[in-house]
Image (cartoon, helix red, strand yellow):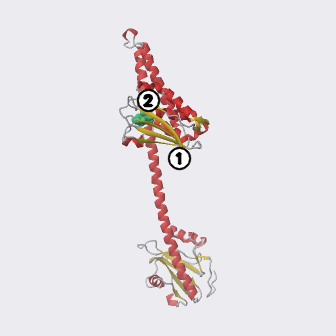
């Protein structure tokens, strides 16, 4: 590039692609990249180069040369213009270099030069050196510009360092989070499989035991055939229930979303139907099912799933209710949405179990044996159905008993 003495050439990119390509020896490509990424522009010189150091303990390295000039990675000589510029934090220049002071054995190129220290907040990153083949009288404007340039370059590098560090930290945190999530998913999957297998094993074992019994010689058979078949029938029904619950709970919400039959449902009619189904079960424990008459509430949703959700909650309130206890079923419409509350004065849920109660197969009462009614999937299904309808379910421990609350949005949209 031709230099016109005394003229400031703006918009000359100090580092260009050709120069970058020629930096085969450079062991700091990241720093060069920063330099080019920020698009450092500088006024023209016949050639230029820069010494950089990325931290205090590192030697300065020559990072740049123009594509037409020789260079070797080197340290700036102490006592030379470079260290003066860095020490004074001011550009150092020589407009008419004497032959004996020629720098860097490139005297054929050099008659004047300016060294611009790159510093910010007292931190010196290095310096830019611009060399001229001819005498070049540096104007006050040029010196000002050189100072600003050094300072801005350093600021930019500082900010980039900071951003990159932050970015690295964020990336690391994200990777850690992802790994933790994957591990947690894997753990849940394994637990789920173990639990599912365990649940299926019990009825299968009972069926097998009864079949073996039935196959014994008639005379030796201690159990009448009818009772054997009844036991098999009960367990087969239980197996079928577990399998159907499992199918539901393991289906992808997105797959089922398309299968939802959304229609207008009268909430009280549906509740009355569910209550009717559990009347006998409640009567057996002398539990009163209380459902005060209320204003008609129409909701849009899948009747079958909504019925399943209400049935599970009401069934639990009876199953974990005390003899002569109560189940209160109330509904209301508020700004939050349609609220359905199922409250009981039964055994209650231990505080430590509350956060896990909606997990698949979780049972608060660990001694609770799998009987025909319990699969440990009931509340997981309640959560699933409320969510697929865009709602939420929560539980509250009461001084005596529990309160389950489902809130469905006023305008129900099925959610994937
Ligand atoms: P299960 O088939 O065992 O009832 P659920 O998912 O419906 O499975 O419930 C999980 C566990 O939550 C139950 O085993 C029980 O310990 C507890 N639970 C659920 N509902 C109630 C309730 N109304 N009162 C007390 N405990 C309850």
Dot 2: element: strand
Label 2 CA crowd tier, 10 Å (few <14, some 14–19, many 20+) = some
Quadrant placement of the C terminus: top right
**Quarter of the figure with residue 258:** top right
Does the beta carbon at disc 2 come under 8 Å from ligand 1?
no
Q: What x and y, as percent, mark residue 27?
A: 49, 68
**Quarter of the figure with residue 3:** bottom right
Can residue 152 be seen at all in this image of the molecule? yes
Most distant residue in the top direction: 219
Instruction: Give above or below for 362 relative to 109.
Output: above
**Quarter of the figure with residue 369:** top left
The residue where tag 2 is placed is 288
Instruction: Give the number of the mark in front: 2 or 1.
Output: 2
Can residue 361 be seen at all in this image of the molecule? no
Q: CA distance from mark 2 to mark 1?
A: 29 Å
Dot 1: element: loop
Tell me which label, 2 or 1, sits earlier in the chain.
2
**Tag 2 near tag 1, CB within 8 Å:** no
Q: Which mark is residue 336?
A: 1
Q: What x and y, as percent, mark residue 256?
A: 58, 37
């Amino acid at each position: 590039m031709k230099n016109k003495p005394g003229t400031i050439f703006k918009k000359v990119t100090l580092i260009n692609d050709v120069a970058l390509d020629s930096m085969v020896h450079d062991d700091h490509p990241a720093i060069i990249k920063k330099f080019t990424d920020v698009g450092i522009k500088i006024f023209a010189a016949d050639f230029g180069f820069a010494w950089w150091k990325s931290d205090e303990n590192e030697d300065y390295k020559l990072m740049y040369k123009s594509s037409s000039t020789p260079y070797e990675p080197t340290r700036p000589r102490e006592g030379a213009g470079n260290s003066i510029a860095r020490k004074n934090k001011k550009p150092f220049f020589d407009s008419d270099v004497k032959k004996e002071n020629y720098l860097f054995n490139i005297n054929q190129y050099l008659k004047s030069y300016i060294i611009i220290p790159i510093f910010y907040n007292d931190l010196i990153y290095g310096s830019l050196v611009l060399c001229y083949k001819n005498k070049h009288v540096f104007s006050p404007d040029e010196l000002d510009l050189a100072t600003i340039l050094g300072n801005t370059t350093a600021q930019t590098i500082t900010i980039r360092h900071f951003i990159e560090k932050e970015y690295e930290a964020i990336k690391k945190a994200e990777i850690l989070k992802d790994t933790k999530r994957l591990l947690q998913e894997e753990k849940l999957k394994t637990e789920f499989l173990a639990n599912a297998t365990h649940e299926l094993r019990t009825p299968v074992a009972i069926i097998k035991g009864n079949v073996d019994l039935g196959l014994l010689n008639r005379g030796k058979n201690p159990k009448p055939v009818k009772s054997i078949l009844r036991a098999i029938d009960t367990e087969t029904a239980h197996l079928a229930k577990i399998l159907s619950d499992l199918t539901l709970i393991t289906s992808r919400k997105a797959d089922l979303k398309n299968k939802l039959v959304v229609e207008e449902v009268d909430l009280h009619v549906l509740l009355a139907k569910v209550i009717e189904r559990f009347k006998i079960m409640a009567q057996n424990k002398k539990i009163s099912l209380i459902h005060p008459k209320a204003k008609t509430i129409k909701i849009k949703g899948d009747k079958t799933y909504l019925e399943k959700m209400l049935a599970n909650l009401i069934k639990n309130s009876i199953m974990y209710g005390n003899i002569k206890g109560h189940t209160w079923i109330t509904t209301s419409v508020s700004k939050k949405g349609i609220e359905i509350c199922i409250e009981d004065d039964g055994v209650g849920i231990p505080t430590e179990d509350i956060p896990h109660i909606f997990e698949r197969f979780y049972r608060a009462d660990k001694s609770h044996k799998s009987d025909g009614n319990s699969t440990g999937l009931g509340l997981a299904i309640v959560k699933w159905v409320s969510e697929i309808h865009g709602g939420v379910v929560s539980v509250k421990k009461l001084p005596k008993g529990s309160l389950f609350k489902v809130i469905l949005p006023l305008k129900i949209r099925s959610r994937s």
